[in-house]
Image (tube, grey):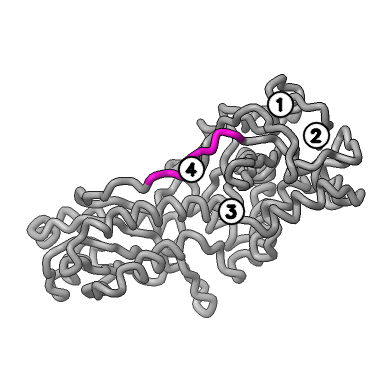
């Protein structure tokens, strides 16, 4: 096991206890079988790299973490969020977790399916641009299972908003959620018994310097008069808001609304927020330990889609840091596998053994040196 203090505190496997309310599901299997024999896609290594080169680059960031956030928009959001988390003692744990997101990555190959898998530590934080995408992937699946069971003539899109305010963002979200609970106790809600899911969206008005959190609901419900719903929402917000939008979803536009909602969960904060330390701090605090997908009523879900079949013949290629070091040295094996990583559909999964030195495990022993 790697002796990295930050890693030891937040990884393998006790870091699961630090995950937020809606912690990530594994999107792949965790185990791996014995190393496969060398094949045409497992060329022997021509250059032995024992330590894989430096773990961190000149800017102090881990090379495997840089790879996980290699898209320009991801990297900007990641680096700005990391800098803001480092400023306060209260977010020190979040900072260490985010700093290690994507760390200790290992690359695996299945000869039977010719697919690649990358395993690494994932922080699971709401403010992490990559983990937000994985949260959204699970949300998309949940919404898809819900929509598959809803009669097309009973699906409505409801938007609940509160007024623009100069209050701190977390207070506004608390107020919005409290108002939604009161709405669900109202007469019109109890009579019609809507059921479905609500998604939180946060916008910021640069001209007025005000936050605007609001909820978008996909609800299976009979017809509810707009005027009655608006009065109920006004009462639920104690007179501070009266704007409600409700519309039937066209049966041919169901998937559009599904993607419309999950898009809110994938995109990082707006540039105006990312580039402002006070605003980004508020945005992070507002989302910490916050459920952004809220179930209401008792929605029925279709059967869960079958997970991809695990080929059970995963062969260890090496560590990502080692492959990147090999690429810098012009190593043909490293070049080959990193090219595959950039071109192929890669299965990503959270590694509960992140940081484990697989090269010391007998089941992965090979006459050829690995990139460790």
The label shown at residue 24 is 4
| Residue at the spot of label 1 | 364
Q: Quadrant of the N terminus?
A: top right
Looking at the picture, does residue 163 appear above or below residue 299? below
* Quarter of the image where the C terminus is located: top right
Per the model, the C-alpha gap separating discs 2 and 3 is: 28 Å
- As measured in the structure, the alpha-carbon distance from the residue carrying label 4 to the one carrying label 1 is 28 Å
| Res 354 seen here | yes
- Locate residue 150: give its quadrant: bottom left
Circle 3: element type: helix
The residue that label 2 is drawn on is 370
- How packed mark 4 is, by other alpha carbons closer than 10 Å (few <14, some 14-19, many 20 or more), is many
Q: Which residues are magenta?
A: 306-313
Percent coordinates x, y for residue 185 in the rendering: 16, 53
Q: Which mark is residue 106?
A: none
Q: Residue at image x 77%, y 27%?
A: 366
The mark that comes first in sequence, 4 or 3, is 4
Residue closest to the eye, 292 or 88:
292
* Tally of numbered tags: 4
Give whichever of discs 4 and 2 has the lower sequence position. 4
Alpha carbon of mark 2 to alpha carbon of mark 1: how far? 10 Å
* Residue annotated with mark 3: 130
Left or right of 25, for residue 342 = right
Do the numbered discs 2 and 1 sit on residues whose CB atoms are within 8 Å? yes
- 77 in magenta: no
Mark with earlier residue (1, 3): 3
Mark 3 and mark 1 in contact (Cβ < 8 Å)?
no
């Amino acid at each position: 096991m790697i002796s990295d203090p930050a890693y030891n505190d937040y990884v393998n496997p006790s870091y699961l206890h630090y995950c937020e309310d809606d912690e990530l599901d594994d999107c792949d299997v965790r185990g791996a079988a014995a190393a496969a024999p060398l094949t045409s896609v497992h060329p022997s290594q021509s250059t032995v790299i024992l330590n894989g080169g430096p773990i961190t680059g000149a800017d102090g960031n881990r090379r495997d973490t840089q790879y996980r956030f290699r898209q320009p928009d991801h990297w900007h959001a990641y680096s700005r969020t990391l800098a803001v988390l480092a400023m306060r003692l209260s977010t020190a744990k979040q900072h260490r977790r985010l700093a290690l997101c994507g760390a200790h990555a290992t690359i695996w190959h299945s000869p039977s399916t010719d697919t690649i898998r990358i395993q690494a530590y994932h922080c699971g934080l709401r403010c992490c641009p990559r983990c937000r995408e994985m949260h959204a992937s699970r949300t998309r699946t949940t919404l898809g299972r819900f929509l598959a069971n809803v009669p097309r003539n009973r699906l409505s899109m409801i938007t609940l908003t509160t007024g623009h305010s100069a209050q701190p963002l977390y207070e506004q979200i608390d107020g919005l959620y409290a108002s939604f609970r009161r709405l669900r106790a109202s007469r019109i809600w109890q009579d019609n018994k809507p059921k479905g899911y609500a998604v939180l969206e946060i916008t910021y008005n640069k001209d007025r310097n005000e936050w605007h959190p609001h909820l978008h609901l996909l609800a299976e419900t009979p017809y509810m008069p707009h005027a009655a719903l608006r009065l109920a929402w006004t009462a639920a917000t104690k007179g501070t808001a009266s704007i409600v939008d409700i519309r039937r979803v066209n049966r041919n536009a169901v998937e559009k609304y599904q993607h419309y909602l999950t898009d809110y969960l994938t995109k990082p904060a707006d540039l105006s927020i990312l580039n402002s330390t006070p605003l980004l701090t508020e945005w992070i605090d507002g989302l910490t330990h916050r459920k952004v997908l809220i179930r209401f009523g008792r929605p029925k879900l279709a059967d869960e889609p079958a997970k991809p079949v695990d080929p059970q013949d995963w062969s260890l290629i090496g560590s990502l840091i080692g492959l990147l070091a090999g690429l810098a040295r012009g190593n043909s094996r490293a070049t080959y596998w990193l090219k595959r990583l950039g071109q192929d559909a890669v299965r990503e999964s959270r590694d509960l053994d992140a940081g484990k030195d697989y090269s010391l495990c007998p089941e992965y022993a090979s006459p050829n040196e690995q990139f460790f």
